Image: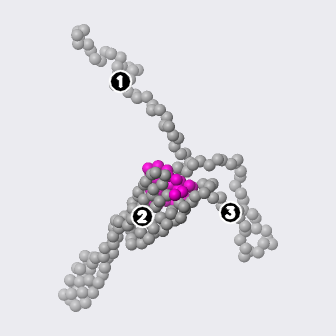
Amino acid sequence: MSEQQPNPYTSDNGGPGNPGYGYPQPYPAAPGYQPTVGGAGIPAQPQAPAQPPAMPPAIPPAMPTGQPPAYAPAPAMGGGAGASGFSLGDITIAGDQIITPSGAMPLRGAMWNATDFSRTETKIPTHAVVLAIIFFLFCLLGLLFLLMKERTTTGYIQVTVTSGGRHHSTMVPATDPGTFHWVMSQVNYARSVSI
């Protein structure tokens, strides 16, 4: 090759021991936040000194068997005010926070809404129509098969929460007519702990 047309493969780019085409890329900088190690966004609680687990008190032989032994009450979750852990769709309440994929929100003062976008249809199944036609030809009782009904529920219930300047919405699939009542009971509980 001549000096006017140099060989592109003779440069140190891509040679042994040298990265080619800008690879490997350097490692990215550490994130400005530290991901939660303990679980679903629950703030870490200060650790108490390690103690062996408490043993239940032994039942002395003189204790009447009709009385249950007295146990210490269970510690509250989160160590502070708020609700115990509960979730609805992808919205989770843990301690005094509402944890969603769009970020954590404060539980206090949250506004909850639920909208029913489900529908329940009642129809005569295909096998009932076939049986009604067959038995109508043999005896006139075949029309009783048309009384068979099939109920199907489709759609979803939309649950929205707004708190701390953030808004999140989730969809809960409706599997039967009672799904909306169940979701409303969950939303009412969330409203009661958000006060």
Residue type at the position of mark 2: Ala
Residue pictured at 58% horizontal, 58% vertical: 82
Q: Residue at x 28, y 76 (%)?
A: 123
In the image, 84 versus 111, the foreground residue is 111
For the point 30% across and 76% down, the residue is 122
Picture coordinates of residue 58, whole percent (x, y): 76, 64
Q: Quadrant of residue 124?
A: bottom left
Regarding mark 3 in the picture, which secondary structure is present there? Answer: loop
Residue 30 included in the magenta stretch of the image: no
Q: Which residue is mark 2?
A: 114
Label 2 sits on a secondary structure element that is strand
Q: Nearer the viewer, residue 109 or 156?
A: 109
Identify the residue position indicated by label 1 in the image: 20
Number of the front mark, 1 or 2:
2
How crowded is the residue under tag 3: few (<14 C-alpha within 10 Å), some, or many (20+)? Answer: few
The amino acid sitting under disc 1 is Gly
- Specify the quadrant that holds the C terminus: bottom right
Of the image marks 1 and 3, the number of the one nearer the N terminus? 1
Q: Which is in the foreground here, disc 2 or disc 3?
A: 2
On screen, residue 45 versus residue 88, left or right, reads: right
